Amino acid sequence: MAPLLEIKNATKIYGGGFFRAKHVTVALQDFDLTIDDHPATITTIAGESGSGKTTLANLVLGFTKITSGQIIYKGIDVGAMNKQQLMDYRREVQAVFQDPYAVYNPFYRVKHIFDMVLKNFKLASNKAEGRALIEDALNVVGMRGEEVLEKYPHQLSGGQRQRMMVARAYMLKPRLIVADEPVSMVDASLRAMILDIMLRLRDEHNISFLYITHDLSTAYQIGNQIYMLYQGAIAEAGGTIEVIENPKHPYVQLLIDSIPVPDPEVKWGGEDVLTLDDEQARVDVKSGCRFYGRCMHRMDVCLTKLPPLYAVGPTHHVAACYLYDKQHVVSPSPDDITPTPAHAQLRTDNQIGDLYEKEPKV
């Protein structure tokens, strides 16, 4: 069976052209990812601002065209799909965006977002059938139509708006939801509710997620596998727990070490590191390691080319660092283990602890 989604050597370069041939930015370089068809998983793309997370989301959703590489859905190259295949792809690959305020037209009642879906994808043959589909979708996210559908967007809270966007995506019965920072603009209680909805959609409805975030705590809570991006390239990837609890790439190690612990005796800050304008390394796909200017282990070989991904642990744990050049070069693959809801809840309650309360930002 073909994977649900394959991304092969995806590269996106902005700028260039006849008049600005040398002014380019490599937003994403040689990115590989595989999401299996079954069981459903939550794949996290994590990194700081400008690391290429949203560029990747836009490529998968078709909002921007890939420079080189392939995005393959159920064995078919998205760039080569015909009109009907593309319509099916748009139905089965849905999006939930970061800002629960900007996605609504303030002049329409909120039921308009559902009416447009029913009309564009011809989901119902009459109003009664359409209303039943809407109610079913709202019930999945803990809402009732009679309480929200006739209201205007400004009459709903941010959490309500975001849950309605999840319901709108669910109504199409998608196979994959691209969730770009879906909880960053809601408060902590609603954040937990939306994350729980994502887990239930994964486990009960076989919907996979491509979860874009800069928050390692939420990634740790719900992610099956994680891809850590740095300046448009994969720094480290593997099972979420393994990567966060046992990081191998120097950048990811610094990132994890920067998370404050709930102990006043422990100094927060760590050692000073060398700094550099990181964007200097993004003007050419042939540049070396993006982290060279800040790495305490930098070597001459790091300037020759972007390091490949080396196997550094179990569950397809890989890191792009020449420190591991004696090990086998591999491509990242999905984690073999899909947590059950009980497993996910155990991770939240007993392992995350104060890590979640501190809400570290990548």
Image: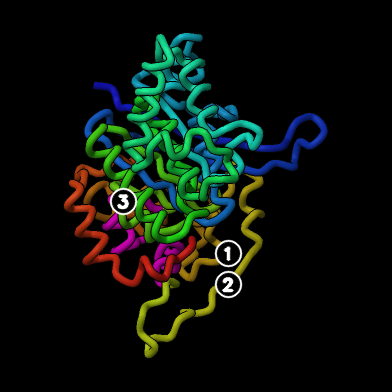
Q: CB of mark 2 within 8 Å of CB of mark 3?
A: no
Rendered image: mark on residue 9: none
Please provide percent x and percent y for residue 352: 29, 65
Q: 51 or 11: which is nearer to us?
A: 51
238 displayed left or right of 276: left
Residue type, label 1? Gly
* C-alpha distance separating marks 2 and 3: 33 Å
Q: Mark 3 points at which residue?
A: 222
Q: Are marks 2 and 1 in contact (CB under 8 Å)?
A: yes
Residue 254 x/y as whole percent: 44, 68
Judge the density around disc 1: few (<14), some (14-19), many (≥20) Cα neighbours within 10 Å: some
- Mark 2 neighbour density, 10 Å: few (under 14) some (14–19) many (20 or more): few
First-in-chain label (2 vs 3):
3
Report crowding for label 3: few under 14, some 14 to 19, many 20 or more residues within 10 A (C-alpha). many
Q: The residue under label 2 is which amino acid type?
A: Leu
Identify the residue under disc 1: 293
Dot 3 falls on a residue whose secondary structure is helix
Give the magenta range: 236-257
In this rendering, does residue 8 appear at all? yes
